[in-house]
Image: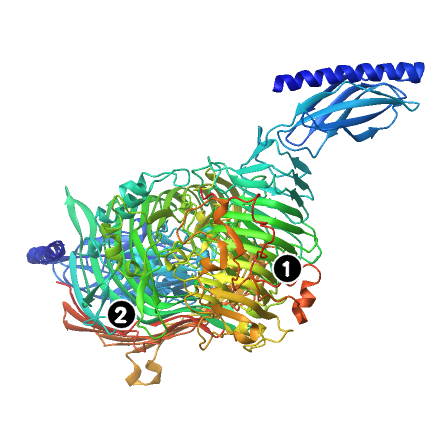
Amino acid sequence: MSMFRRFARATTVVAATFVSACNASDSTGPSAPLPVLGLAVTATGSSTARVTFSGRSGESYDIERAEGAAGTFATITTIAALTADATTNYDDRGLTVTTLYRYRVTAIKNGARTPSAETSTTTLAFGSAVARISTDITVSRTLFADTAYTLSGFIHVANGATLTIQAGTTIKGDFETVGSTLMVLRGAKIQAVGTVKAPIVFTSSRAAGSRQPGDWGGLILVGNAPDNRSGTVNVEGTGTSAGTTSGTNYLVQYNGGTVATDNSGTLAYVRVEFGGYAPLQDQEFNSFTFAAIGSGTRASYLESLAGLDDSFEFFGGGFDLDHLVAFETADDMLDMSEGFSGRIQYVIAINTVQLTPRTGAGFYSVDLQGFENDGCNGTGCDLGHGSQPYTIPLVANFTIIGCGQASCMGAGGGYGMMLRRGTGGYYVNGVIARWSTGAVSLRDPFTYTRAGSTATPSETADLQMRNVLFAETNNLAFQAASATQNVLDLTGNNLTLSTATAASLFTAIPAVGSLATSIAAFDFTPTTGSPIASGGLATFTGSIAAKAGTFVTGTSYLGAAAPGGTKWWTGWTNYTRN
Amino acid sequence: MRRSFVALLAFATLLVSSAAVSAQQPAGRITGRITGRIVDAATGQGITDAGVQVVGTAIGVLSGVDGRYLVANAPAGTVTLLVKRIGYAQKQITGIFLDAGKTVEQNISMSSAAVTLTASVVTAQAERGTVAEATDQQKSSISVVSTITAEQIAKSPDGDAAQTVKRVSGVTVQDGKYVFVRGLGERYTTSSLNGARVPSPEPERRVVPLDMFPSGLLQTITTTKTFTPDQQGDFSGALVDIKTKEFPARRTGTLQLGSGYASGATGLSHFTATGVGGERFAMVNHDRDMPAVLRSIKDFQRLNLTQADMNLLAGSFRNSWTPTSGTGGPLMNGSASFGGNDPVLFGHRLGYLISGSMSSNTDVKTDHVRALADRGAIKGETIELDKFTGQTVSQGVLWGGLANLSTYFGTGSRISFNGLYNRGADNDARVETGSLTSDGIQAKITRMQYVERAVYSGQLAGEHQITAAQRFDWAATSSGVRRYEPDRSEFVQAIERDTPTSPEVLRWVNGGSGGAVRTFSDLRETNHEYRATYQLDFGPATSQRSIKFGGLYRTTSRDAQSLSFAIAARGLNNADRALSPEQIFDGRFGTATSNIFSVGPLSQGGSYQARDNILAGFAMIETPIGQHIRVIGGARYESDELEVDAFSTLGDPVRTFKLWNDILPSLAVNIKLSETQQFRVSASRTLARPEYRELSPIITRDVVGGENVQGNEGLLRTNVDNLDLRWELYPRQGEVISIALFAKQFHSPIERVYGAGSGGTSFVFYTNAESADNYGVELELRKDLDAFGRFFTPFTFFTNATVMQSQIHLAASTQAAATNLNRRMVGQAPYVLNTGLTYSSRNGASTATVLFNRVGERLTAAGGSPLPDVIEQPRNVMDLSLRFSVTPNVTVRSDIKNFLDTPHAITQGTVVRESYSSGRIIQAGILWRP
């Protein structure tokens, strides 16, 4: 079959050359250019190829490309007329990995065209080359998808540099250099834009099958947006080394920023797997740390897999995120504090078991929660839990599923939402399921103050919770009211304490303790007639509407997936636990 | 174990009784011995070549090194001595009562002929008395010193050097052991034993816990507050020198036994830390050692431990987590000493003192409350957080001994050996309940901690009076300490209710890193110190000058290790979590199919080694200007080469190397305003070096306080400029009134401050502040009250008070900005007051003393912004002490300590960070001098 095809193609080429040569001599005479000489095409990466030929003075060239053995040619670029004879290179980008491409170059002179014979190449597989990154990145750099990078040490992107990562690139945190972590510091940027088919993956350097939470550190972004702590505050876990030696874990300050619109870059289709090493006792790195990130930054389609601390942690700042997946989190699935004011829509977080972390890397948290949002805590909170700006995120369409048993949530954990220390925030159109202690805790009076100290907060209050369904939450919507704890009114806020099982809400979710990895086991789409298929807050009003702007939209359903909608958590994610 | 204690007592008794027997043997003689020192009344220095004659006989001797003399065969009866020396007014001492075969000690002071022309006659009684000697030492020293003598110690209820030294003006004692002078941090106070540096057994501090030295072994404690070049440069703020007892002039022995009642502990039932044997003697056996299987793991992080490995590790810890219950026993203490001066070496006289002491006590801190302070929503407001209430029970034991030997070669040389060994242990248990707000847990925390400390020192020293004008002293000292803290345990249980109305259940906090923790720490340090001093006197006797120079070499090596391990368990159900720790770790979850335990290291990189070599030299000159002014000036050069290797689990060992060379000048002027008045001025520069641990740049968990601590390899050593003024009046012998002003400026002082991390985490680190100032006034008064009438004649009143102020200036740009930038120095109290009243019976045999001590609001830690600083609140402490002689050989003592029982309280803003009551102690004892 293939031999026949190759023969057929050769025949076509010969015939075409013959025909075009005849045409040339017939129609335009001596002014028609000669075919280009020395045409060669080399795959230079998983998405790039280089076309090289010997160009002649006075001629311009159309470079044409066809995908696969049978694709049709189309011009991809035109090279302007040369002023001198020169070897001409053209780097073709944006190709699909391990795919055959055919190229030809048509020489053009005085309107006469002479196409060349065609030649072909196949783009390289992802990660077929290797490289080690062991020093700080202080000038802009691109990481290519064809290379498997090992991140060895505490690598800071600094000094205004931009780190560009091609779609499909894999970066492995070095197991041997314990705690290896990528930190994009204030002033620097990361442009890591993957695709559904070619996500950017940060993972452990250990072989698949033997990876564990805590194998390496994580991805830390530090911006210049404001927060609510004074003095000098450093990113948790940094500072095991003195000085600022390249590649070492020196202190990284993040607070005191002033530019709310600061831009730290773009993340899309990025996974962070098996991170969370604790350089200091009880100070694990998160899978994703967003410290003081400004609104110029944009993040979408992020997955945290099997991290030893929080999946997504936000300190101050505020920017837009959408489509987040947190799977097998060892501490909190989402943690926002210190004045974080970002907007997030579409979040899936699910735990099924407690994994065994890397030896000596740290421990599972003693208080595993879904959300753990704080106002301000610690040194530099000049007004204690009332320090400003308040933590007021908008989180919409969240599906937060716990592991269902006290034994995997820690003695202080087990709440789908732990709101403490004066945090505010707008939480709408969500599902909180399988939390062994309760659905929500308004831990202290400072937090209740944000709600206006009323069980039915007004639509201008800094803390509002609307249209959220609780299922399998120990039959408890809110931690019981006491001298310090308060509850919100269910009816008045359209909150539902459902008697349905969590499993009945969705098309498919893994059972508690299940080790399912097949994507079929993860379908968060509401079943027909599911209470979460409807009941959403479709139209926002008051502070929520003001905050949402055009970025977050109301939905008729609850949770992260529209009935019959796109299964956006498939294709680019990973649900393998080791 | 109890048997060995009995054996020790029996041995001591045997020693004493044999001494008593031998002392009675030479009853047939009709002569006795008179011995003592002849000192310069102005300088306190020994006078060599003074002639001592027994009046009315041909018996006479010349004084030797350090002014010591011995009249070996004076006739028994009442004797008069005549002392003569060129340049000094001659002096007669009358009324020395000498029993046949006995030895009498008589020290004699001589005044310069330039000052006193006429010969004087005084009674032996008047010339005697160690309180007077102390005053003389204070009066005659070229520095500002305060001395507490053995006699004062004996009058106080103090059991160890730390309790004693707090009687000195300007001294505060923290935690019953760490000494601060003039409100300066402990880093500015140096301790020495018989003039040589004592290594510190604390991993993060250089200060020596003075409670390691039983008072029964002490001759004097001298606190020197001004620097002279013959002292070590890191003296910085003050030097506390502990001098162990010297041998007595005549053969003697003592036996002292005591027992006491502690109001909070004795006879009451309370819990007791468990042990493996040997804790009661501070000699714990190896069952507390780190499990061998754990020790064999060098690199936890890169190993792939299987579940079976984890089960083995979890099962390797000693399965003891819970204190047992017990009843508090009485306090016990005892000591015995035996000394003399006998021709034991082929007729060559050897002075000797062998002494041993031991004590044990149970210390209960009742209503022990601790809490953290959080920031309120109003600026400056503080809110109580994580309050825990409970009880701490500590069983302490302290024992030790010394052997001092000394002999003369001719009259010009004395060679002595001082050997000391002390060992103590505290076995603590603490149970408390409260809330861990951050984790959302109501918790019960059970801790057991055993700490053993040992210090040894051996010193060989020589004093050589080469000619009347030349003197050469040397000493070689080898000393070491060990702080051994094997197997500290912490177990945390959550107090849970399954429904709001169901009963509370205790369940293990089986996740996180703090639910079950074992810690193993060991620190060893050895010191070798060699020093030599040469002194030459010259010029006319009426205005004699002296020049002194010398050198010192000290080498120190320290090895500190601290390793912590946490045990966590996955998937344990509530019924299993409710088991007792001893059940959880009894192996039921360690079977081949068990899949729950994980063990990991916590104190990541808590080990370091340090080597420190100091080479120093000094020269100083002392010269009179006119008749009333003495000037002492000079300089010291110190070169310090220091290397610290710290071991972190992240990456390779970190080495810090420092070389510091310093020249430290000093000038002191003493002006004698009259026979009884002096005025002193002293200016000097000293230094304070960072503690070794502070220089290792890795982060470790503070062994004591549980905080992450980061060293700083860039630390500078601190230079301190000191200025002291002091006016003294000595109205009569034994009386003193003095006023001192002091001012110090610190350049780059090292401060312990907080750094902040995201999410409310914090860590401690060290930084050089820009500068700090410290100034204050000290008053001292000791006065006999006979002026108020006959009734008051037996009373002596004494008081000392220090009022001081300091200010630290931190650079706002540093990480230290997380604490208040302008405040007092950490450790500073605004005032210290000591006062007391002593009644002495006419013959001095019975005394009663009331002592009162109050320390102002002391800053114990700088608050993390915007919290206020942490303050230890003042307490009134009153001690009563009675001594009365039953027979000439037997003294009975009775003490009431902490009579007022004011609670201890440490506050931060409105939050009580820690409070407890330690209870009153009533003790009684008997002292037998056969």
Quadrant assignment, res A337: bottom right
**Visible in this render: residue B555?**
yes
Mark 1 is on which residue type? Arg
Vertical order, A133 against A192 (above or below): above
- Relative to the observer, which residue lies in front, B143 or B8? B8
- According to the picture, the residue beneath numbered tag 1 turns out to be A343
User: Which amino acid type corresponds to the residue marked 2 in the rendered image?
Assistant: Lys
Residue A246 placement: quadrant: top right
In this view, the residue in front, A180 or A232, is A180
Image side of residue A461 versus residue B637, left or right? right
Q: Is residue B561 left or right of residue B765?
A: left
User: Which of B326/A82 is in front?
Assistant: A82
Q: Is residue B245 visible?
A: no
Q: Above or below — where is B109 with respect to A123?
A: below
Quadrant where the C terminus of chain B lies? bottom left
Q: Position of residue B156 (x, y in %)?
A: 28, 69
Q: Which mark lies nearer to you, 1 or 2?
A: 1
Q: CA distance from mark 1 to mark 2?
A: 74 Å
Chain ID, mark 2 = B
Chain under label 1?
A
Q: Which mark is residue B38?
A: none
Question: In terms of depth relative to the viewer, which is nearer, A562 or B196?
Answer: A562
From the top left corner, tell me how far across and down residue A203 is, in percent.
52, 40
Which residue position holds label 2? B155
SS state under label 1 = strand
Taking A498 as reference, is B442 left or right? left
Query: At which x and y percent is residue A168?
Result: 61, 37
Mark 2, secondary structure of its residue: helix
Image quarter where the N terminus of chain B lies is bottom left
